[in-house]
């Protein structure tokens, strides 16, 4: 493991590489789990991967990939089954791993709905079955189709197999004319043990766990084999309906039970997060005696009208969350503390451990966050772990819950060697010897060497050629490191002069280990292909601190061309002037990001490197977003004060859907300021600039939803 930093200390380049790796790992895990029914990692590890990915995207929204795992559900379909397109997508659930996550979920729901913390808000809580999701379509009371979740939009037709499961009714009485019932196919522990015994007796391969057995049994091409497997089904949701089942989640589940479906008897209606956690603990205690596998508890807003109002994100509903059970902990000895240097110069401590198994995975490295964490204090100087510091030779507790990168949770001072002294965090860079300083308010100590520090230079080059940036085929991280060490590439511009500096290029490059004439020519061709680059990719590739993929796209969409962007950033001054005002008025661009971009263009060495690079490029303009036919399409809107008929999040989402640009501050380019009660300085500035100020009712009338 080369990078064990916590999310809050990752640089953008480091986060970008993490997301690349996580996307590959999660995609492989999805294929193994959903398509091949042979998972290669534990559920806890999979959850950790997904949560790590989500945490990085939350901190660096600009780095979010087009194929982000958070935008995907399930995996590609296996061959051998007909495809079924779901009328209503089968989505996944956001995960919670602790009390704070559950409280945060409740808080987000209330804020979105405009409810106070004291307002009653009912949820359902039920065990999360560890099986295979299945959708059952009934027309006129008859089962006409059964489909797996697949990728969420398209599943596999397993109708004949589903008909063999006793828990699935073939005919319904009193059901809506169209009813899609959704639930989980699973296998009980006793049935699983009996099946594996039969498999062994017949000389056939045993299944790894009940979930694998259930998934593999349901997805047999021969339904006769499925009929021999002891599969069961719990109903817990629905898709397409010709008429509502009930007004509440709990009422709808009760209706499904009356129609003949098996529903989980442990589902309970709870008022607020404390009641949810109480029920979670009760289910956790019963977990070992249930007779089937569960990996958490699912919470859903009970009122279906509120569910509809909350709606969905790209791949998860806002009104539900899965509270997963915790992963394992383990104790081991800390053998050494190493310091890694990232692209922005951040010094990150890494624990080298006596290998130990945690959650089914052997762990030899773990993050130590920063110097404060090692010393037993937080960034404010307050004690953590009771003020106990961490020293080489200590016995430490390692955990992996909620994060793919192992972490040190605690230390046992009673087992500390007598000669173990406090760890002295370095004040100079271990790579270049430059001073490593810690600025006020920053939890990270950073090398001041800049481009003279090989660690920073190499990491910046790796970022430059990464997939979301220039994505030069044949020039990956290993090649960048090798070329840098040999002095062939020191700046991005050097990449585009590589062929010229090699002469013909072929003879010199093919003599290098791992290179031949074909691979050398392919590399030069790939470099030439990237001389034309879209503006957003170029901005992202520059590796400016705080600028990710999304923010690079925001900047590109606003300025459209490199000439306009470069001129604006050259003229801008931090905190003042029209260029600064225009930059910070872009929705999603705050003072921190804007300062980083402006300062990059005003640093002599950085600017020289950028100018040298652009001289080799043809930067493609980025077109504005496709127009939307509405009264506010293309208009810039700012919301201020308290909105009474919708929450701020709803108002923003509605405006953007209608083609408007929602900004965070008022400028001369603002078209409308929508002001509710309590509007202050923004309203005054709008009046001063002659911006149209309207109330919430007028806004709703304007967009046609009054």
Image: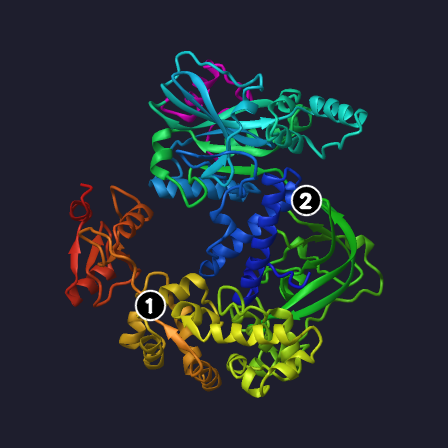
What quarter of the picture does the N terminus occupy? bottom right
Q: Is residue 155 magenta?
A: no
- With respect to residue 262, does 372 lie above or below? below
**Picture coordinates of residue 82, whole percent (x, y):** 50, 34
Residue at (44, 78) in percent of width and height: 600
What quarter of the picture does the C terminus occupy? top left
Counting other residues with Cα less than 10 Å from the Cα at mark 2, is it few (<14), some (14-19), or many (20 or more)? some
Residue at (63, 73) in percent of width and height: 479
Q: Residue furthest top?
A: 173
**Picture coordinates of residue 631, whole percent (x, y):** 17, 52
Q: What residue is disc 1 on?
A: 584
Residue 380 appears in the picture as rendered: no
Q: What residue is disc 2 on?
A: 40
- With respect to residue 262, does 698 lie above or below? below
Q: Which residue is at the front of the view, 73 or 394?
A: 73
Q: Earlier in the sequence, mark 2 or mark 1?
A: 2
- With respect to residue 627, does 235 lie above or below? above
**Does 238 sit left or right of 195 as displayed?**
left
- Does dot 1 land on a helix, a strand or a loop? helix
Q: Which residue is at the front of the view, 341 or 681?
A: 341
- Does dot 2 land on a helix, a strand or a loop? loop
Report the span colored magenta.
245-273
Q: Quadrant of residue 536?
A: bottom left
Residue at (74, 25) in percent of width and height: 193
Residue 42 appears in the picture as rendered: yes
Q: Residue furthest right?
A: 418
**Picture coordinates of residue 22, whole percent (x, y):** 58, 54
**Does 363 sit left or right of 690 as displayed?**
right
């Amino acid at each position: 493991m080369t990078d064990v930093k916590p999310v809050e200390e990752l640089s953008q380049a480091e986060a970008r590489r993490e997301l690349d790796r996580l996307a590959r790992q999660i995609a492989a895990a999805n294929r193994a789990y959903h398509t091949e029914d042979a998972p290669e990692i534990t559920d806890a590890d999979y959850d950790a991967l997904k949560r790590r990915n989500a945490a990085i995207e939350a901190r660096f929204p600009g780095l979010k990939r087009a194929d982000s795992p958070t935008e995907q559900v399930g995996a590609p379909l296996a061959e051998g089954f007909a495809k079924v397109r779901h009328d209503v997508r089968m989505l996944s659930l956001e995960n919670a791993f602790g009390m704070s996550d559950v409280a945060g979920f409740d808080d987000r729901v209330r804020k979105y709905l405009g409810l106070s913390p004291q307002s009653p808000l009912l949820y359902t809580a039920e065990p999360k079955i560890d099986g295979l999701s299945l959708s059952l379509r009934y027309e006129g009371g008859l089962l006409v189709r059964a489909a797996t979740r697949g990728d969420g939009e398209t599943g596999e037709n397993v109708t004949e197999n589903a008909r063999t499961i006793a828990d699935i009714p073939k005919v319904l009485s009193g059901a809506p004319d169209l009813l899609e019932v959704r639930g989980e196919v699973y296998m009980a522990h006793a049935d699983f043990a009996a099946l594996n015994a039969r498999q062994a007796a017949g000389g056939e391969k045993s299944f790894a766990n009940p979930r694998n057995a259930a998934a593999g049994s349901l997805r047999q091409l021969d339904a006769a084999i499925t009929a021999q497997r002891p599969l069961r089904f719990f109903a817990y949701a629905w898709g397409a309906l010709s008429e509502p089942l009930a007004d509440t989640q709990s009422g709808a589940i009760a209706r499904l039970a009356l129609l003949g479906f098996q529903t989980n008897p442990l589902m309970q209606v709870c008022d607020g997060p404390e009641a949810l956690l109480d029920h979670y603990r009760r289910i956790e205690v019963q977990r070992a005696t249930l007779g089937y596998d569960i990996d958490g508890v699912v919470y859903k807003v009970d009122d279906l009208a509120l569910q509809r109002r909350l709606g969905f994100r790209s791949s998860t509903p806002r009104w539900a969350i899965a509270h997963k059970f915790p992963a394992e902990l383990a104790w081991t000895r800390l053998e050494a503390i190493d310091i890694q240097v990232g692209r922005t110069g951040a010094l990150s401590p890494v624990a080298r451990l006596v290998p130990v198994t945690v959650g089914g995975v052997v762990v030899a490295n773990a993050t130590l966050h920063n110097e404060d964490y090692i010393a037993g204090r937080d960034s404010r100087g307050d004690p953590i772990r009771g003020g106990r510091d961490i020293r080489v030779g200590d016995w430490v507790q390692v955990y992996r819950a909620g994060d793919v990168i192992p972490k040190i949770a605690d230390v046992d001072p009673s087992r500390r060697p007598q000669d173990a002294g406090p760890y002295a965090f370095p004040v100079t860079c271990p790579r270049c010897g430059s001073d490593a300083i810690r600025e006020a308010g920053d939890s990270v100590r950073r090398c001041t060497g800049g481009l003279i520090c090989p660690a920073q230079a190499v990491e910046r080059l790796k970022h430059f050629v990464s997939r979301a940036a220039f994505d030069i085929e044949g020039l990956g991280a290993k090649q960048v490191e090798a070329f840098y060490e040999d002095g062939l590439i020191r700046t991005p511009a050097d990449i585009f002069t590589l062929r010229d500096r090699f002469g013909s290029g072929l003879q010199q490059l093919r003599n290098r280990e791992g290179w031949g004439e074909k691979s050398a020519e392919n590399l030069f061709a790939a470099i030439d292909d990237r001389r034309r680059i879209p503006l957003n990719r170029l901005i992202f590739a520059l590796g400016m601190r705080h600028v990710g993929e999304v923010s690079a796209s925001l900047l590109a969409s606003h300025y459209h061309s490199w000439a306009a962007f470069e001129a604006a950033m050259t003229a801008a001054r931090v905190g003042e002037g029209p260029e600064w005002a225009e930059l910070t008025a872009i929705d999603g661009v705050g003072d921190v990001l804007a300062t980083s971009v402006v300062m990059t263009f005003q640093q002599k060495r950085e600017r020289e490197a950028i100018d040298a690079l652009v001289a080799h490029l043809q930067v493609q303009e980025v077109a504005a977003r496709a127009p939307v036919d509405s009264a506010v399409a293309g208009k810039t809107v700012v919301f201020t004060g308290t909105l009474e008929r919708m929450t701020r999040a709803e108002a923003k989402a509605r405006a953007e859907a209608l083609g408007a640009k929602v900004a965070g501050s008022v400028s001369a380019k603002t078209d409308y300021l929508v002001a509710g009660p309590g509007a202050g300085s923004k309203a005054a500035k709008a009046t001063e600039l002659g911006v149209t100020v309207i109330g919430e009712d007028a806004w709703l009338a304007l967009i046609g939803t009054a």
